[in-house]
Image (tube, rainbow, N blue to C red):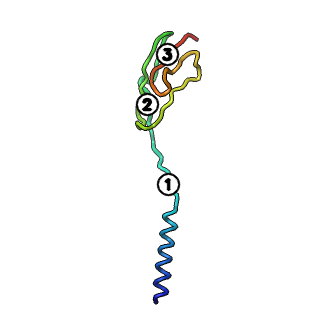
Amino acid sequence: MKKRLLYAAFATLFIFLLTACRDKEDVVLTLKPQLNPSELTLTVGDKATVTLTGVPQDVEVFWITGADNIATPVNRTHDKTDVKAG
């Protein structure tokens, strides 16, 4: 009887140890980022401020452009854009 109780205790401990070593499930956040204004028309020399909402404060945001000769983010983590002729 004591052996069965001992085996049951070891089996239970073994199962708990195995389940404790499992990888935790990844948490997926659903974000709805929005730019304000959503559209912007500028002429040469104009500057504009674009505000990003709908993302957590601790998320790092990078402002980039594929056409540096036309629009250049002043600071990659800020929200201003200079427009050049191009």
Q: Is residue 10 above or below residue 64?
A: below
Specify the amino acid type for callout 2.
Answer: Gln
Tag 2, which secondary structure? strand
Q: Residues within 10 Å of mark 2 (few under 14, many from 20)?
A: few
Instruction: Indicate which label's residue lies in the foreground, 1 or 3.
Output: 3
The x and y percentages for residue 2 are 46, 88
Which is nearer the N-term, disc 2 or disc 3?
Answer: 2
- Between marks 2 and 1, how big is the CA–CA gap? 28 Å
**Disc 2 versus disc 3: distance between alpha carbons?**
21 Å
Numbered label attached to residue 43 = none
Q: Nearer the viewer, mark 2 or mark 1?
A: 1
* Label pair 2/3, CB-CB below 8 angstroms: no
Q: Residues within 10 Å of mark 3 (few under 14, many from 20)?
A: some
Nearer to the camera, 51 or 17: 17
Q: Amino acid at mark 1?
A: Glu
Q: Nearer the viewer, residue 37 or 14?
A: 14
Residue located at (45% from left, 24% from top): 79
CB contact under 8 Å: marks 2 and 1: no
| Lower sequence index among marks 2 and 1 | 1
Residue 25 image label? 1
Residue at which label 2 appears:
34
Which residue matches tag 3? Answer: 82
Type of residue at label 3? Asp
Q: Assign the C terminus to one quadrant of the image.
A: top right
What distance separates the C-alpha of mark 1 from that of mark 3?
A: 43 Å
- Residue shown at 41%/31% (left/top)? 53
Tell me what residue is drawn at x 47 percent, y 75 percent. 12
Going from N to C along the chain, the mark reached first, 1 or 3, is 1
